[in-house]
Image: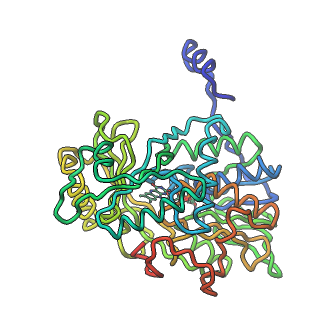
Amino acid sequence: MRFSALRILKEGLTGNKGWGAHWRDPEPKAEYDAIIIGGGGHGLSTAYYLAKNHGLTNIAVLEKGYIGGGNVGRNTTIVRANYFLNGNSEFYSHSLKLWEGLEEDLNYNVMHSQRGLINLFHSDGQRDAFVRRGNAMVNQGDDAVLLDREGVRKHLPYLDFDNVRFPIYGGLLHPRGGTARHDAVAWGFARGADMRGVDIIQNCEVTGIDIENGAVTGVQTTRGAIKTKKIGMTVAGRSGQVAAMAGMRLPIESHVLQAFVTEGLKPVIDHVISFGMGHFYISQSDKGGLVFGGDLDFYASYASRGNLPMKEHVMEAGMTLMPMIGEAKVLRSWGGIMDMTPDGSPIIDKSHIDGLYVNAGWCYGGFKAVPGSGSVFSHLIATDQHHSEATGFRLDRFRTGVGLMDEEGTGSQHNLH
Ligand SMILES: Cc1cc2nc3c(=O)[nH]c(=O)nc-3n(C[C@H](O)[C@H](O)[C@H](O)COP(=O)(O)OP(=O)(O)OC[C@H]3O[C@@H](n4cnc5c(N)ncnc54)[C@H](O)[C@@H]3O)c2cc1C
């Protein structure tokens, strides 16, 4: 089934009876060439690119819940390529380029909106840091525009520019940054993978990883044992638990990150705004809700719900930046389980077990990474070679200390990321 304007017109005129399910609901087979554990953004995009770029179609994605139920459907939908360090910079740039052709590629409307992202700064030191970041972005081939205070005011006149603690000095505008509809991204990749023959199996929890003589032989699941020689692990916040099934201990802590949405409002915020000093970021969804978030809850947890002190902190940060937000009613809040690495950068690597590949540690950056991660991880699984845009995400950097990518400059303290 292909989507097109003509098809929408035809269905509209004939009672919308011709739309089918977006993907099949197959029973698991006894054996696959490769199994992807976790049907979030990364698992689905990996399966999609394995089929599309590498012709591997005897693949299953095993998802313990339902497609879109994890972080891929819980994030604040920000898509950007404004990373500073080598390693991250080229990877996120690669990912943003894939985003820019994604809707045509998937034949699916993921509502990718490049409305521009503005990172605010509030001191001379922070301005210097953003100038350096902007230069790194431009050197990478991405876009960055330094705005002074009046430049920011032109775009975002409703901010409190003269807050005593956080007066606004200016901002770094990333015009190609923006948002996308998160669950549509999961559905689009699921549909695309399914159309190429991938089995997407929901309600199928992996409970064990079978290993013989140092090599993967299959998985145990709540729907029976399945044989395979290759396993890609893309379980985000559950990475530590699933790695433990293979006897591995990953340098990852799982933390809760909350997000919030207000009632629908008329268009008021037409950019993504990031207020790093106050740990607050915000955009407006196409339905009109103001979608915003802050920082982690500051203790490790597998609960997908957050604590009250962080709610209070985020609301205070919002009021500091834009007092008008106090007029809006918060509709709901939720939490997701974040896979945090000590250097704030991800892991895409082979493990010491033959056939077991690890994709984890996405911290705050995992949604924007979805297409890029799938493209480079599928390359690793199919060829056993690291993709040129993801050579820095090695697991052994945490053992050797060589090649750490400490994007936030916060060292190994998780709660400072
Ligand atoms: C509140 C919040 C806001 C965020 N905002 C942004 C943002 O604005 N921009 C951005 O880039 N990133 C953001 N992120 C981060 C981003 O959402 C995640 O890094 C990314 O979605 C994680 O990858 P995923 O989509 O594959 O994860 P998930 O969707 O969580 O997928 C992992 C899947 O694995 C499944 N699974 C786990 N264990 C098993 C098992 N044993 N067997 C089978 N399946 C299993 C889970 O059920 C889950 O569906 C945010 C995250 C949160 C929580």
258 shown above or below 355 = above
Residue 296 location, quadrant:
bottom left
Which residue is located at x 55 percent, y 64 percent? Answer: 236
Of residue 118 and residue 207, the one placed in the foreground of this image is 118
Q: In screen coordinates, is 87 left or right of 284?
A: right
Quarter-of-image position of residue 242: bottom right
Query: Can residue 57 be seen in the rendering of this structure?
Result: yes
Nearer to the camera, 120 or 113: 120
Is residue 203 visible from the viewing direction of this image?
Answer: no
- Assign the C terminus to one quadrant of the image: bottom left
User: Percent x, y for residue 319?
Assistant: 21, 55
Q: Position of residue 84 (x, y in %)?
A: 52, 65
Q: Position of residue 232 (x, y in %)?
A: 70, 64
Q: How is the image coloured?
A: rainbow
Q: Is residue 264 left or right of residue 177?
A: left
Instruction: Look at 72% across and 51% down and name the residue there.
Output: 49
Residue 172, x across and y down, in percent: 41, 55
> Considering only vertical position in the picture, is 395 above or below 332?
below
How many numbered discs?
0
Q: For residue 240, which quarter of the picture?
A: bottom right
Give the residue drawn at x 21%, y 58%. 320
List the single residue furthest toward the top. 13
Question: In the displayed image of the protein, which residue is found farthest to the bottom?
Answer: 400
In the displayed structure, would residue 7 be above or below residue 401? above
Q: Residue at x 73, y 58 (%)?
A: 378
Q: Quadrant of the N terminus?
A: top right
Task: Name the side, left or right, on which 324 lies relative to 219.
Answer: left
